[in-house]
Image (cartoon, grey):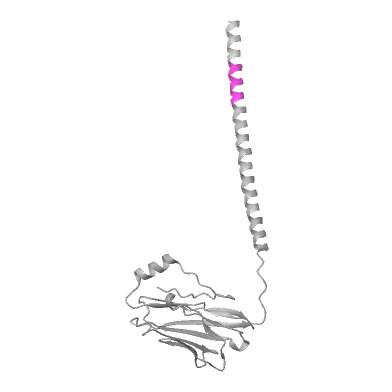
Amino acid sequence: MHFTLQKRNKTWMPAINFSIVGLMVYIMACPASSMDVLVHNQIDVLNGTMVRIQCIFTSCYKMDVNKFAMNWTYQENTNKTEEMFMTYKKGMMPLRTDRFSDRVQFVGNLEKNDLSITLSDVQLSDKGIYNCYVRNPPDRIQGHGIINMFVVTELPPPRDSTIAVAIGASVGGALALLILSMVVVKCIRRHKKQELISDEQKMEEEGKLDAEGGTEEGTKQL
């Protein structure tokens, strides 16, 4: 069962909401050895701002601080070697690098399996691939989350929902008008049919009366 976010999810401050029911189902159905790492596969960050890069893992085993291990690494692209900038071995240890200096901080919560970090004063050169590696023995599988971060110089234009609302209202109004028209036409046809039936009944009754009147006159003449 994979909970990793696979969609191209663009966001300024990525956030992941987990379903308690889904987590319970995962725990109940958890195999003997299984780990998943939940991340946003793509994030867009405004140059000069701070971003939270989330990494949360699920495992069938409770974390043992003496065995648990985690690494954060950075790559300019898939062809470049990875540069480690944070690790955990019996304690969280940010690694000072020329690229990030002291701009990276751990903001997660190990008790909640949250390994998230923040990167402040984002630069254009920070664009690249961020890898979150997790190992939680006795789970034999190493978790791996991949985040592609893009740095932009301006915010995208806000989405205008007015057009969508107007189109929806127009379609809804047209549909309601069509249904009303069909009802009116149906009512008119039914009314005309009833009028025709009434006219036929009147003609039949008048015919019967004429026939009865002719019979009486014939009887009188005899």
Question: In which quadrant of the rendered view does residue 60 lie?
Answer: bottom left
Camera-nearest residue between 21 and 196: 21
Q: Nearer the viewer, residue 165 or 172?
A: 165
Q: Give the vertical position of 118 relative to 172 (above or below).
A: below
Seen from the viewer's position, the closer of residues 198 and 27 is: 27
Give percent across and percent down for residue 80: 52, 93
Q: Residue furthest front?
A: 91
Q: Is residue 117 above or below residue 165?
A: below
Q: Is residue 181 magenta?
A: no
Left or right: 139 in relation to 44: left
In this picture, residue 64 sits left or right of residue 157: left
Residue 205 lies in the magenta stretch? yes
**Residue at left offset 58%, top offset 10%:** 216
Can you name the residue that lies furthest to the left here? 32
Give the image location of residue 119, x and y in percent: 56, 83
The residue stretch that appears in magenta: 201-211
**Residue depicted at x 38% and y 67%:** 25
On the image, the x and y values in percent for residue 222 come to 58, 5
Q: How many marks?
A: 0
- Residue 162, located in which quarter of the rendered image? bottom right
Quadrant of the drawing holding the N terminus: bottom left
